[in-house]
Image (cartoon, grey):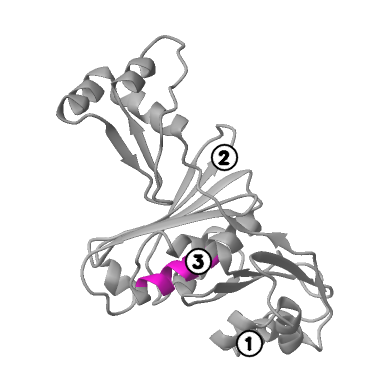
């Protein structure tokens, strides 16, 4: 059985306080890659972070977006993934020179920030993630265990074709007959090979690991690449810069060009557009945009 394209499955252990999720990305992940030429090592880390972002966004049941952002002073300067509550994904990265070593080595003196941004203007939450661990999975599960006070395990894998991941989380203590269930579930999951995580369907994966357990699998949710950039958003950014800054920029060139780092879309604003930007209650003129 083939993996379900661009999907997230939730599952639940019927007789143990354990829940889980499995995500598989193919077209959405390739859409992230095709807009930039990422080195193989960075591409793998980005794929793992994309899978992790979908798993965490689904776990948190957001009405808004989750942003995982790594900023560094090493070879990796920036690695950022955003996933909305309805599982729309985008990502980008900046790097400098050849890439060798573990994630902490590549980031160097940097930080890992998780941002929860509510859709309707609620309070934004930011958490600083200690770079404790050698991989995206180790770093995030250490953070989740401390911040959520729920034991969490992540398994992530990615290549140029697909990205996949699985999350297990121990729910708050309940009366349980099987005290070893968590230990057994995580021990079995630790036997997963990257190829199995990438290639098996969720049904096959759960049967491979937990055929002796009673596990309920829920219907898949679709995941898709989608960039939230728009001409209106760029126009608002230019308004915030102010008329003098925009005029100064246009005095040096005929148009202002703004590139979205996520989808590589290009927006252009000329003098006519700029005049309308700062006209009271005037709509923004839609001039031609190019990819």
For the point 47% across and 77% down, the residue is 159
Image quarter hosting the N terminus? bottom right
Name the element at disc 3.
helix
Q: Quadrant of residue 70?
A: bottom left
Q: Height in image: 129 above or below 170?
A: above
- The residue under label 2 is 118
| Residues rendered magenta in the picture | 42-52
Q: Earlier in the sequence, mark 1 or mark 3?
A: 3
Residue 287 picture location, percent across and down: 41, 29
Q: Are marks 3 and 2 in contact (CB under 8 Å)?
A: no
Q: Quadrant of residue 9?
A: bottom right
Of the pair 150 and 138, the residue shown nearer to us = 138
For the point 68% across and 59% down, the residue is 222
Of the pair 235 and 125, the residue shown nearer to us = 235
Q: Height in image: 134 above or below 278?
A: below
- The residue under label 3 is 30
For the point 51% across and 43% down, the residue is 228
Disc 3 versus disc 2: nearer the observer: 3
Does residue 49 show up magenta in the picture?
Answer: yes
Name the element at disc 1.
helix
Work out how far the residue at label 1 is from the one at label 2, CA to CA, in angstroms. 36 Å
Disc 1 versus disc 2: nearer the observer: 2
Disc 1 crowd rating (10 Å Cα; few below 14, some 14-19, many 20+) is: few
Prevailing SS of the magenta stretch: helix
Q: Are marks 1 and 2 in contact (CB under 8 Å)?
A: no
Please indicate, yes or no, whether residue 116 appears anywhere in the rendered image.
yes
Q: Quadrant of residue 72?
A: bottom left
- The residue under label 1 is 187
Disc 1 versus disc 3: nearer the observer: 3
């Amino acid at each position: 059985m083939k993996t379900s394209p661009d999907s997230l499955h939730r599952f639940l252990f019927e007789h143990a306080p354990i829940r889980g999720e499995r995500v598989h990305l193919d077209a959405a992940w390739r859409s992230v890659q095709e807009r930039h030429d990422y080195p193989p090592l960075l591409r793998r880390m980005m794929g793992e972070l994309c899978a992790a972002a979908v798993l965490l966004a689904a776990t948190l049941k957001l009405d808004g977006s989750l942003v995982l952002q790594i900023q560094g002073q090493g070879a990796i300067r920036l690695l950022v993934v955003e996933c909305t509550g309805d599982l729309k994904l985008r990502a980008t990265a900046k790097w400098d020179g050849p890439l060798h070593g573990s994630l902490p080595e590549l980031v160097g003196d940097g930080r890992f920030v998780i941002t929860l941004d509510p859709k309707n203007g609620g309070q934004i939450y930011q958490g600083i993630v200690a770079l404790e661990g050698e991989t995206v999975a180790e770093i995030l599960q250490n953070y989740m265990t401390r911040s959520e006070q729920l034991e969490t395990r992540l398994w992530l894998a990615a290549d140029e074709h697909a990205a996949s991941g699985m999350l297990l989380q121990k729910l708050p203590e309940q009366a349980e007959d099987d005290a070893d269930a968590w230990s057994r579930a995580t021990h079995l999951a630790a036997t997963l090979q990257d190829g199995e995580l990438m290639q098996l369907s969720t049904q096959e994966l759960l049967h491979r690991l937990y055929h002796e357990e009673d596990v309920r699998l829920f219907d898949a949710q679709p995941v898709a690449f989608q960039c939230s950039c728009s001409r209106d958003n760029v126009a608002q950014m230019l308004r915030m810069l102010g008329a003098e800054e925009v005029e100064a920029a246009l005095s040096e060139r005929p148009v202002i060009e703004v590139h979205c780092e996520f989808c590589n879309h290009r927006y252009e604003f000329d003098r006519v557009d700029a005049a309308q930007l700062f006209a009271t209650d005037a709509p923004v003129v839609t001039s031609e945009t190019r990819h």
